[in-house]
């Protein structure tokens, strides 16, 4: 099996999982996917609608935290 095919199978696995998960389970999945030694591209996983929504929420919280820290 060539490298590209193996990566495609791994990405498909993570995309299928991400499509059915919600909440903190998505965070664990994103960490697992981005830590996987055979993956170097994550756009398909990050483009799953519920992952994208969760990332936007997390980034919004991060931005709010930065604003609060800057005011201290």
Image (cartoon, rainbow, N blue to C red):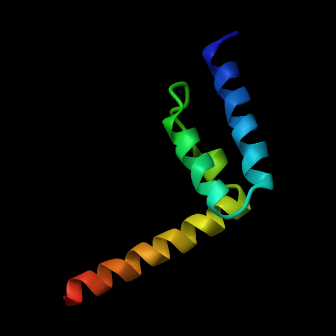
Q: Nearer the viewer, residue 9 or 27?
A: 27
Asked if 40 appears above or below 25 in the picture, the reply is above
Give the farthest residue toward the bottom.
Answer: 71
Residue at 52% of width from left, 41% of height from top? 34
- The tally of labels here is 0
Residue 58 placement (x, y as % from top left):
51, 69
Q: For residue 63, what is the image quadrant?
A: bottom left
Q: Is residue 19 left or right of residue 54?
A: right
* Residue drawn at (56%, 73%) of the image: 57
Name the residue rendered at 47%, 70% in the picture.
Answer: 59
Residue found 78% across the figure and 53% down from its top: 19
Classify residue 17 as left or right of residue 61: right
Q: Quadrant of the C terminus?
A: bottom left
Q: Position of residue 47 (x, y in %)?
A: 66, 55
Considering every residue shown, the one lying at the far left of the view is 72
Tell me residue 3's x, y (percent).
61, 16
Q: Quadrant of the N terminus?
A: top right
Farthest residue toward the top? 1
| Residue 7 screen position, x and y as percent | 64, 26
In this view, 9 is above or below 33: above
């Amino acid at each position: 099996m060539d490298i590209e095919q193996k990566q495609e199978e791994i990405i498909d696995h993570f995309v299928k999982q991400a499509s059915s998960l919600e909440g903190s389970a998505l965070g664990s999945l994103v960490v697992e996917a981005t830590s996987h030694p055979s993956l170097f591209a994550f756009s398909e996983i990050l483009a799953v609608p519920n992952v994208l929504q969760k990332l936007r929420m997390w980034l919004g919280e991060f931005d709010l935290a930065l604003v609060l820290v800057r005011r201290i």
